[in-house]
Image (cartoon, rainbow, N blue to C red):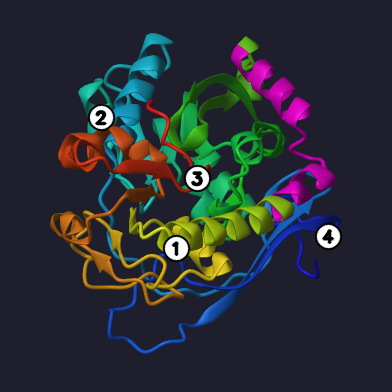
């Protein structure tokens, strides 16, 4: 890569995943907007020095429409803060600052319920929260330095991230998207935290998105040391091979195989007279549909609860995005679920799908969605 690593500035590393030119996954064109959509290179590079997996290009992509937060994401936020509180890391009456993600609700209100109070912009805080926010920073070194600098003496930095180990283990190649500049492993994050004088002290794992981690870090000079929960994650990183170029390159073959299988499956369903409709106009659905060459002939619609997305189409395709109320019109035999975490709530909201004999299908596994 001609540009230096976004975190350690090293130029040593390798391309591990290349999805070619892709549309901006969160820019949903209106259904009557003409094709083709603008395309941007989408490639993942692994730094040989610090181990950070990152996008090569800084594609300037359009702003995204607001999606509907999955109930599982909101529940996990409350669960996470309860675990941090039980560990004694929240000072009652202490100040809290947050660097949130644009994709979900901030944790600030939850933190306040646990006895914390907000601080002003740029002020020090006893608890600094980053909930999937760091991935949106093109300058990873600068963003992490800013967050650690906000932590008051004796305070804690809480970082939540979709673990690279989980992405590899589940073959989640399609989480790669423009605007998400880094894909963090616990191994890389602990090294980057050390560059800022911080040590990871505690970690919690969650099933969300196949494997997310909440990492607590504090100043090394204040005696912060990793406990068994952090050591366990570091061992798992080693076992899975989050810094192994060949392991990461395995995502390339997974992408090619998965796209081909999806296309064949949809062709087979259509040949047998079965209608398949998608559910969840999520960013991860875009590279899958584009790489598989899927259009509205094979997938006549994708359902989404976000009013901002309804009336649009999936980027890079002509597949319309429709409201849940329209799903029944298609009389689907299968509903392809692009975000498996949605299963409990869509089952509750649309019980007639299974009552009619249709099935929810995991878009990654192309089989029944596993209940959480």
Tell me the quadrant of the picture where the C terminus can be found: top left
Residue 155: % across, % down: 47, 24
Which label's residue is closer to the chain start, 4 or 2? 4
Q: Measured along the vertical axis of the image, is residue 153 above or below residue 320?
A: above
Residue identifier under label 2: 110
Q: Which mark is residue 271?
A: 1
Magenta span of residues: 229-252
- Mark yes or no: residue 331 visible: yes
Nearer to us: label 1 or label 3: 1
Element under disc 3:
loop
Q: Where's residue 132, x and y in %?
A: 45, 44
Which quadrant of the view contains residue 356? top left
Measured from the top left, where is residue 349 in percent x and y?
Answer: 16, 40
Residue beneath label 4, please? 11
Neighbour tally class for label 1: few under 14, some 14-19, many 20 plus, Cα within 10 Å: few
* Type of secondary structure dominating the magenta stretch: helix
Separation of residues labelled 2 and 1 (CA atoms): 50 Å
Residue 300 percent coordinates (x, y):
33, 68
> Which residue appears at 53% of the width and 47% of the height?
146
Location of residue 203 by image quarter: top right
Q: Could you say which is closer to the camera, residue 100 or residue 198?
A: 100
Farthest-out residue, front = 272
* Mark closest to the chain's N terminus, 2 or 1: 2
Which of discs 3 and 2 lies nearer the camera? The answer is 3
Binning the other alpha carbons within 10 Å of mark 4 as few (below 14), some (14 to 19) or many (20 upward) gives some
Judging depth in this view, the residue of 278 and 12 nearest the camera is 278
Mark 3 vs 2, N-terminal side: 2
């Amino acid at each position: 890569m001609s540009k230096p690593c976004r975190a350690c500035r090293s130029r040593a590393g390798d391309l591990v995943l290349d999805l070619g030119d892709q549309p901006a996954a969160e820019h949903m064109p209106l259904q009557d907007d003409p094709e083709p959509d603008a395309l941007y290179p989408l490639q993942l590079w692994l730094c040989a020095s610090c181990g950070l997996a990152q996008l090569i290009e800084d594609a300037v992509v359009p702003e995204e429409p607001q999606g509907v937060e999955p109930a599982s994401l909101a529940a996990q936020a409350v669960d996470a803060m309860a675990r941090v509180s039980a560990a004694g890391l929240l000072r009652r009456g202490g100040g809290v600052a947050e660097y949130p993600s644009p994709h979900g609700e901030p944790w600030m209100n939850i933190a306040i319920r646990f006895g914390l109070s907000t601080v002003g912009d740029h002020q020090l805080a006893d608890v600094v929260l980053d909930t999937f926010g760091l991935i949106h920073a093109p300058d990873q070194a600068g963003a992490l330095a800013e967050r650690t600098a906000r932590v008051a003496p004796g305070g804690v930095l809480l970082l939540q991230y979709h673990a690279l180990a989980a992405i590899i283990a589940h073959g989640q190649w399609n989480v790669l998207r423009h605007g998400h500049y880094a894909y963090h492993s616990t191994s890389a994050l602990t090294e980057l935290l050390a560059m800022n004088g911080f040590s990871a002290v505690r970690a919690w794992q969650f099933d969300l998105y196949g494997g997310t981690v909440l990492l607590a870090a504090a100043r090394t000079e204040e005696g912060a040391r990793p406990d068994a929960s952090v050591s366990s994650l570091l061992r798992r990183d080693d076992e899975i091979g989050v810094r192994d170029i060949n392991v990461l390159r395995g995502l390339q073959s997974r992408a090619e195989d998965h796209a081909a299988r999806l296309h064949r499956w949809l062709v087979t369903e259509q040949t047998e007279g079965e209608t398949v409709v998608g559910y969840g106009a999520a960013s991860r659905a875009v590279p899958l549909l584009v790489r598989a060459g899927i259009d509205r002939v094979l997938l006549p619609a994708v359902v989404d609860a976000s009013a901002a997305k309804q009336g649009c189409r999936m980027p890079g395709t002509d597949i319309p995005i429709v409201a849940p109320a329209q799903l029944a019109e298609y009389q689907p035999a299968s509903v392809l679920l692009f975000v498996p975490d949605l299963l409990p709530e869509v089952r509750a909201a649309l019980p007639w799908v299974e009552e009619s004999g249709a099935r929810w299908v995991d878009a990654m596994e192309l089989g029944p969605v596993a209940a959480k």
